Image: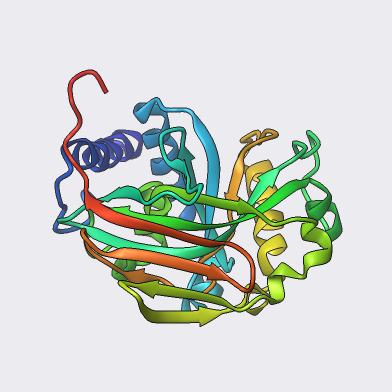
Amino acid sequence: MSLVEDRSRIAGRFLAARRAAAGLDDYPGAFPTTLAEAYAIQDEAIAAWGRPVVGWKVGRVPPPLIDRFGTDRLTGPIFRQAPARANGAALEMPVFAEGFAAGEAEFLLRIGAAPPAGQADFTLDEAADLIGAVHGGIEVASSPLGRINELGPIAVISDFGNNNGLVVGAEIPDWRASRFEQWEVVTRIDGVVVGEGRASGFPDGAIGAARFLFELMAARGIALSSGQWISSGAVTGVHPARPGQTVEARFGDGPSVTCTLVAARPERGDE
């Protein structure tokens, strides 16, 4: 089997599991050796999924693997069906009951202006200038592959960056002056504190996630556009959860965002 055929087969097995809301016991094929191979599988899956990409999640590469892979971050797509507005309502967000599921408190950046074509490198100020708004929110991380995080960045990249939804909270007024990256962020599951942190604890903070994305997409030849979201990283860590549990993210004295996880259902024929 050729490398291209194997990529398509792996992407197809991930998508089949997502469509069936089924679990995967192990990585569905020969395990890639590089992030480039994993992103090629992701590209295959995006094309086969056929849903509009409305944003990108940015996740962390664990410190022991940074030297091996030559990066401290990774990315995966967010699809049109995924972003949901909180608006004070109790949202139900689907996760794969037979796979991996987690709730992650994140600052969500909305692209205000597309990165200039041909620009490959960005300063933090240049990246910030392209951001039109910042919101508090929750990334719903979920994959049919239960061991996805144990297997590491290659597995995460292969399956849409381990993303299955985004809950968009209120916009942060005057985000540039707000010092939001210094805010204390708290995550609760069923009312119990499971994590605390600040975006400033990341290398170059949330804006650093945007810069990473702009540079990576320029290198991959993928155009970003105004209005797309950037989920900038799990401020308080990754907190496994299960269907029926409620995840709450509180951002300093600003917005609080809540959702309840429910078991994903198999797709109908018209979806």
Question: Which corner quadrant of the image does residue 125 belong to?
Answer: bottom right
- Image spot of residue 79 (x, y percent): 45, 36
Camera-side residue: 117 or 4?
117
| Residue lying at 18% horizontally and 20% vertically, measured from the top left | 269
Q: Can you say whether 232 is above or below 55 in the image?
A: below
Eyeballing the image, is 216 above or below 190? above
Residue at the front extreme, as displayed: 88
On-image quarter of the C terminus: top left
Provide residue 127's location: percent of width, then percent of height: 78, 53
Using the rendered image of the protein, determine whether residue 34 is visible from the camera's viewpoint: no
Q: Residue at x 42, y 40 (%)?
A: 82
Q: Residue 13: in sight, yes or no? A: yes
Colouring style: rainbow
Q: Quadrant of residue 97?
A: bottom left
The quadrant in which the N terminus is found is top left
Q: Is residue 149 above or below residue 137?
A: below
Location of residue 261 in the rendering, given as x and y in whole percent from the top left corner: 28, 56
Q: Residue at x 42, y 52 (%)?
A: 161
25 left or right of 172 in image: left
Tell me what residue is drawn at x 15 percent, y 52 percent.
23
Work out whether residue 33 or residue 258 is closer to the camera in this orientation and state it. 258
